[in-house]
Amino acid sequence: MAPRPKPKRDRGRHFFRAWRENVFPNQMDAMEALGWSQSKISRLENGDTPYNQDDLEFAAEVFGCSPADLITRPPGDADRTPEIQLRSALLAFGVDAEDLGRAVSSVKVFVDDLDEQPSQDLPDDQHERASGRRVKVPSR
């Protein structure tokens, strides 16, 4: 008996392409960041091949969204979180996609530390002027 072909499932609408275009204007940049072939990206974007959990999780990490975002909602300027902007900037500055999660975590820790530190303003605005000349103090 010959194998019966699987019926082609009509996959629901997803937003993989929109999220990819939000971070990478072209597939070549996405290929580099994801380490995937152009055909794999194209097939996923066109719904010609099913996505799997591993692909969704990895792409979401690179795109700066959640795996659920890739299949439930398009990116939007109103939804462009600081984390998405940070991930995009780190990728633009050459951070490898594999190191992206650690880089974002490091920046978040740094920013959280800054938020927790009390302001150390000098009383009565005794800050040194930026344009003023520095006075040299003799060493002992």
Image (spheres, rainbow, N blue to C red):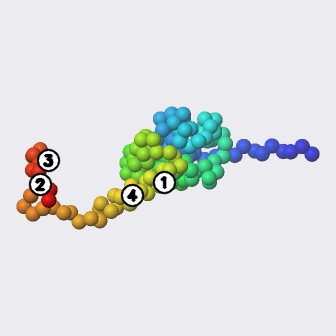
**Could you give the CA–CA distance between mark 1 and mark 3, rounded to whole angstroms?**
37 Å
Kind of residue sitting beneath label 2: Pro
Task: Determine which residue is flagged by label 4.
Answer: 108
**Comes first in the chain, label 3 or label 2:** 3
**Comes first in the chain, label 1 or label 3:** 1
Task: Determine which residue is flagged by label 3.
Answer: 130
Q: Which residue is drawn at 12% across and 62% down?
A: 122
Foreground: 115 or 38?
Answer: 115
**Could you give the CA–CA distance between mark 4 and mark 2, rounded to whole angstroms?**
40 Å
Task: Determine which residue is flagged by label 1.
Answer: 101
Q: Nearer the viewer, mark 3 or mark 2?
A: 2
* Callout 2 crowding tier (Cα within 10 Å): few <14, some 14–19, many ≥20: few
| Left or right relative to 100: residue 54 | right
How many labels sit on residues?
4
Residue 109 quadrant: bottom left
Residue lying at the far right of the rendered structure: 1
Foreground: 116 or 67?
Answer: 116
Residue 104 image offset from top left, x and y in percent:
43, 53
Task: Determine which residue is flagged by label 2.
Answer: 138
Q: Which residue is drawn at 11% across and 51% down?
A: 136
Kind of residue sitting beneath label 4: Lys
Q: What element carries label 2?
A: loop
**Comes first in the chain, label 3 or label 4:** 4
Foreground: 11 or 114?
Answer: 114
Q: Which of marks 1 and 3 is in front?
A: 3
**Could you give the CA–CA distance between mark 1 and mark 4, rounded to whole angstroms?**
11 Å
* Callout 1 crowding tier (Cα within 10 Å): few <14, some 14–19, many ≥20: some
Q: What element carries label 1?
A: helix
**Quick one: quadrant of the N terminus?**
top right
